[in-house]
Image (cartoon, rainbow, N blue to C red):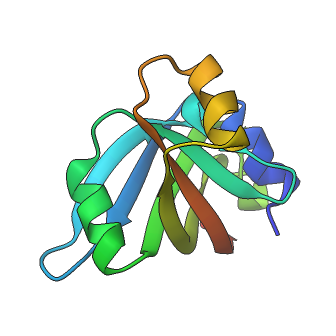
Amino acid sequence: MLSDKFYEVLKNEGIVTIVTWGKGEPHVVNEWNSYLVVTEDERILIPAGIMHTTEKNINDNNKIKMALGSKNVKGHDNYQGTGFVVEGTARFLYSGADFNMMEKKFKFLTRVLEITVTSAKQML
């Protein structure tokens, strides 16, 4: 489901915007492309240090949207820069093999945001 272009974007630094919504207003947090780890089965793992509102929202509604991009990766029609909108479901991991792997890479995490991708659309 995740294209070669998506992986190319991850190799270039850029901002990632994560949107969750529970019972109230949508909530937005940001992360960096370099913090995203994609597993063999294409789940996206993100280190979470704070993200308390994100977690509360996911406990109420596990749907998530995420936007990421890089101006350094050519997009459609050779456009300078490209980005993706990812949709999926999310949960937080507190232990296990994926948590342990992420904890070795990102010492600051308290848990791991796991996204199971249902859609990844290139926008530019």
Nearer to me, 3 or 53:
53
Question: Which quarter of the rendering shows the C terminus?
Answer: bottom right
Left or right: 37 as drawn, with respect to 114: right
Q: Residue at x 49, y 45 (%)?
A: 94
> Where residue 23 appears, x then y in whole percent?
17, 83
Left or right: 87 as drawn, with respect to 73: left
Q: How many marks?
A: 0
> Where residue 120 appears, x then y in whole percent?
67, 69
In this rendering, the answer to whether 17 lies above or below 11 is below
- For residue 61, which quarter of the picture? bottom left
- For residue 55, which quarter of the picture? bottom left
Nearer to me, 27 or 89:
89
> Where residue 50 appears, x then y in whole percent?
27, 37
Q: Is residue 87 visible?
A: yes
Nearer to me, 89 or 124:
89
In this rendering, the answer to whether 117 lies above or below 31 is below
Q: Residue at x 84, y 59 (%)?
A: 41
Q: Is residue 12 visible?
A: no
Question: Which quarter of the rendering shows the N terminus?
Answer: bottom right
